[in-house]
Image: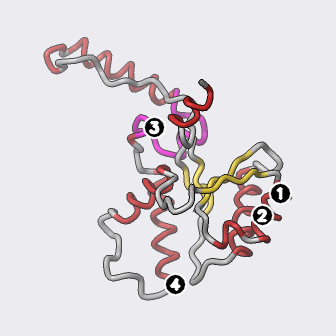
Amino acid sequence: MIEDIYSRKIVGYEVHENECGDKAAELLQRTCWREHIANQPLVLHSDNGAPMKSVTMKAKMEELGIASSYNRPRVSNDNPFSESTFRTLKYRPNWPSNGFKSLQEARDWVQDFAVWYNEKHKHSRIKFVTPSQRHQGLDKKILDKRKLILDAAKTKNPLRWSREIQNCKAIGAVTLNPDQEQKEAA
């Protein structure tokens, strides 16, 4: 899976029977083409798995102008964005707790999940807009409209609110380790 941490959108994914650097490199290239982001300053943060550190993957990243960043050694949850997405996936009501019967069934399930996650799931960390809405730059307009509606509702019925309306300001830049980056800047 490849996730844009700014929007939380799953921009690339595939399901295979085994991990392989060649398949990971092909997924990365297809994702860059589909997203029109080849040869732009990008960083791919990944785990320390063999596919992500393979010669094929490193060569593909260099070819596409993508810098690499890896989890810290022996730290399996170093990317809270992808960990959050996988948790959402595993807690879906239709998650097959007994596993998938076939590779095709797994692929179909992941396809349905990705569509739901990107297009329908209102993500709490991006102010309850969908990842696709944020990815397309629509979040600010949606949140501005939401603020107008909430302000009007509060004006009409002020006793319904014991506090201010929810913060409808779009979130800004997203970083992988903001605390660490602030310490390094100081």
The amino acid type of the residue labelled 1 equals Glu
First in residue order: circle 1 vs circle 4: 1
Label 3 environment density (alpha carbons within 10 Å; few <14, some 14–19, many ≥20): some
| Residue 141 position within the rendered picture, expressed as x and y whole percent measured from the top left | 52, 27
| Residue 84 position within the rendered picture, expressed as x and y whole percent measured from the top left | 43, 53
Horizontal relation, residue 39 to residue 16: left or right:
right
- Which residue is disc 4 drawn over? 103
Label ID, residue 58? 2
- Which residue is disc 1 drawn over? 62
Mark-to-mark CA distance, 3 and 4:
33 Å
The amino acid type of the residue labelled 4 equals Leu
The reply to whether dot 2 and dot 1 touch (C-beta < 8 Å) is yes
The amino acid type of the residue labelled 3 equals Ile
- Callout 4: helix, strand or loop? helix
Query: Residue drawn 59% across and 79% down?
Result: 16
Q: In the image, which residues are magenta?
A: 125-140
- Which residue is disc 3 drawn over? 126
Label 1 environment density (alpha carbons within 10 Å; few <14, some 14–19, many ≥20): few
Q: Looking at the rendering, which quadrant does residue 85 occupy? A: bottom left
